[in-house]
């Protein structure tokens, strides 16, 4: 018997071909705008994907369907955070819950590096100078050798540590307590302000969930 996926029409339009390439026999029940899902379709749903396009406008409708789908066995969320009471309700019903922790670690860590480089080179000033056709020489401040406080050591924090180390920086992980899996010095969360301020102008803070 084929699984029946519950998802939004927006998600299916964008990614349906890729899903069916992986699971050719999958069937779907789609959330279309504000339209209700028929009772017969509720009974068919066995798996569900909560995609970003459903948040926040259609989240209420989406989870209303998920809660009424008695045969739902597995729900995957696009977000890393699944601490909302609605997820606990589904888990209490025996629904398997998975999340997307780590899926965005690379792009977010690269964005962190973008901002660190922008700070080091005073990018706003450079953009203003370019707009004014001012081409005066200036000294750049390099990231190499500078300290960086990385708050948390989940997938994003690990990738930030990897990239800042590759740039020659000296990362310090700030988390509730050391776990033994860290690749650089660790300080407790209570010391965040001191760690971040310890390097004066050389300190940079990269925060992550």
Image (tube, helix red, strand yellow):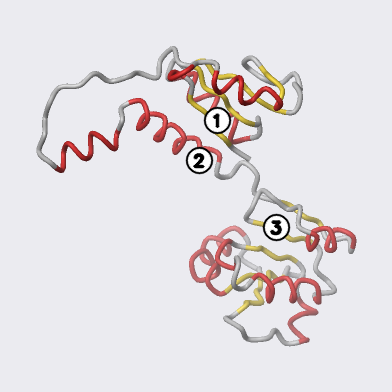
- Please rate how many residues cluster around mark 3, counting C-alpha atoms within 10 Å: few if below 14, some from 14 to 19, many from 20: some
Q: Earlier in the sequence, mark 1 or mark 3?
A: 3
Picture residue at 31% right of the left edge, 27% below the top: 121
**The N terminus appears in which quarter of the rendering?**
bottom right
Measured Cα–Cα span from mark 3 to mark 2: 21 Å
Query: Which residue is the site of mark 1?
Result: 159
In terms of sequence position, does the residue under pointer 3 or pointer 2 come before the other?
3
Mark 2 crowd level (few <14, some 14–19, many ≥20, 10 Å Cα): some
Residue 199 or residue 97, whichever sits in front: 199
- Using residue 163 as the reference point, say whether residue 94 is left or right of it: right
Question: Which residue was labeled with disc 2?
Answer: 108
Residue 19 position in % (x across, y down): 58, 62
Q: Indicate which label's residue lies in the foreground, 3 or 2.
A: 2
Q: Quadrant of residue 141?
A: top left
The residue at the point 61 percent across, 25 percent down is: 193
Query: Residue drawn 73% across and 68% down?
Result: 3
Residue 144 higher or lower than 20, as above or below: above
Q: Which residue is mark 3?
A: 76
Which residue is at a point 57% across and 35% down the rendered structure image?
207
Quarter of the picture containing the C terminus is top right
**Residue 188, located in which quarter of the rendered image?**
top right
């Amino acid at each position: 018997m084929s699984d029946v996926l519950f998802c939004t029409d927006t998600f299916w339009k964008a990614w349906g071909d890729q899903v069916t390439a992986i699971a050719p026999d999958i069937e779907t029940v789609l959330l279309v705008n504000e339209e209700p899902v028929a009772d017969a379709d509720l009974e068919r749903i066995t798996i569900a994907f909560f995609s970003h396009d459903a948040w926040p406008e259609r989240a209420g409708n989406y989870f209303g369907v998920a809660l009424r789908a008695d045969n739902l066995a597995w729900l995957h969320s696009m977000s890393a955070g699944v601490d909302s009471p609605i997820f606990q309700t589904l888990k209490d019903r025996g629904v398997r819950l998975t999340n997307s922790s780590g899926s965005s670690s690379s792009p977010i860590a690269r964005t962190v590096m973008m901002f660190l480089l922008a700070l080091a080179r005073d990018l706003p000033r450079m953009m203003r100078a370019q707009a004014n056709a001012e081409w005066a020489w200036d000294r750049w401040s390099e990231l190499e050798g500078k300290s960086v406080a990385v708050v948390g050591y989940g997938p994003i924090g690990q990738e930030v540590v990897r990239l800042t180390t590759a740039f020659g920086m000296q990362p310090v992980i700030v988390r509730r307590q050391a776990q033994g899996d860290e690749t650089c010095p660790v300080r407790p969360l209570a010391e965040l302000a001191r760690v971040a301020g310890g390097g004066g102008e050389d300190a940079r803070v990269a925060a992550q969930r």
